Image: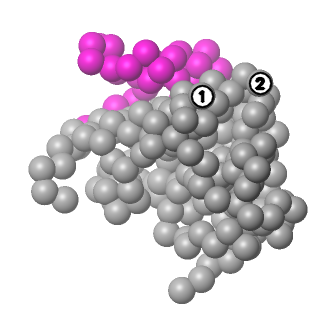
Amino acid sequence: MENFRLDRTLYNGRPADAAGRLEKEMRTYDLLDSLGIEYFRVDHDATASIPACEEVETILGIHICKNLFLCNAQKTKFYLLLMPGRKKFKTKNLSKQINSARLSFADDAHMEEFLDITPGSVSVLGLMNDTENRVRLIIDNDVLKDEDFGCHPCINTSSLRIKTADILNKFLPAVHHEPIFVDLPWEE
């Protein structure tokens, strides 16, 4: 990854200075702080793929989840799928488990409208912006095997390590999203 700038410092909590940071990122820290959720942060250039996150993962000591924004063919049902970053995604495996045929990737406009997130920055934390519950959260059970959870604070220029239990027991109830749990297979 040529020219990828990475601050190798592991910060505990929010940035001391909000200069140059988006308001939605700062709102994310405000919510996590108000819920008493501890988090560690690494700042870096934009990361739009799992391979780009490998160095970030090493510093945080976690695996960053793959976050996929999906919809049905009619674009009437929207889903945010959290799964291990190194697991391959096949729509047929998920479609059967949630009884939704013909799933595909949802468009950028709905992503921004519902989650206030742009492509490459998709994160479970974006559910804080889905006050009308238009997006259903789906979590692959393999994500729950790790004590810590990795995600972006609604922008892909920082990455966070948060306790998985805090996401499930504090964050999701606070943003009124009940997850659907699925078992997606590991495939070559």
Which type of secondary structure does the marked residue at label 1 adopt?
helix
Q: Quick check: is 28 in the magenta stretch?
A: yes
Q: Residue 178, located in which quarter of the rendered image?
A: top right
State the residue position of label 1.
113
Q: Give the quarter of the figure containing the N terminus.
A: bottom left
Left or right of 22: which side holds 99? right
Q: Can residue 170 be seen at all in this image of the molecule?
A: no
Q: Can residue 70 be seen at all in this image of the molecule?
A: yes
**How many numbered discs sit on the rendered protein?**
2
Q: Give the quarter of the figure containing the C terminus.
A: bottom right
Q: What residue type is labelled 1?
A: Glu
Q: In the rendered structure, which segment of residues is drawn in magenta?
A: 9-38
Q: Residue furthest bottom?
A: 188
Q: Which mark is residue 132?
A: 2
**93 in relation to 179, above or below:** below
Q: What residue type is labelled 2?
A: Glu
- Kindly identify the residue that appears in the image at 64 percent across and 30 percent down: 114
Tell me if label 1 and label 2 are in contact, CB under 8 Å: no
Left or right of 3: which side holds 130? right
**63 in relation to 10, above or below:** below
Mark 1 is surrounded, within 10 Å at the Cα level, by few (under 14), some (14 to 19) or many (20 or more) other residues, namely few
Inter-mark Cα distance, 1 to 2: 11 Å
Q: Where residue 21 appears, x then y in whole percent? A: 33, 20
Q: Residue 37 carries which label?
A: none
Q: Nearer the viewer, residue 165 or 54?
A: 54
Q: Where residue 22 appears, x then y in whole percent? A: 38, 20
**140 in relation to 16, above or below:** below
Q: Quick check: is 12 in the magenta stretch?
A: yes
Q: Which residue lies furthest to the right in this view?
A: 99
Q: Which of 162 and 6 is in front in this view?
A: 6
Q: Where residue 150 appears, x then y in whole percent? A: 50, 47
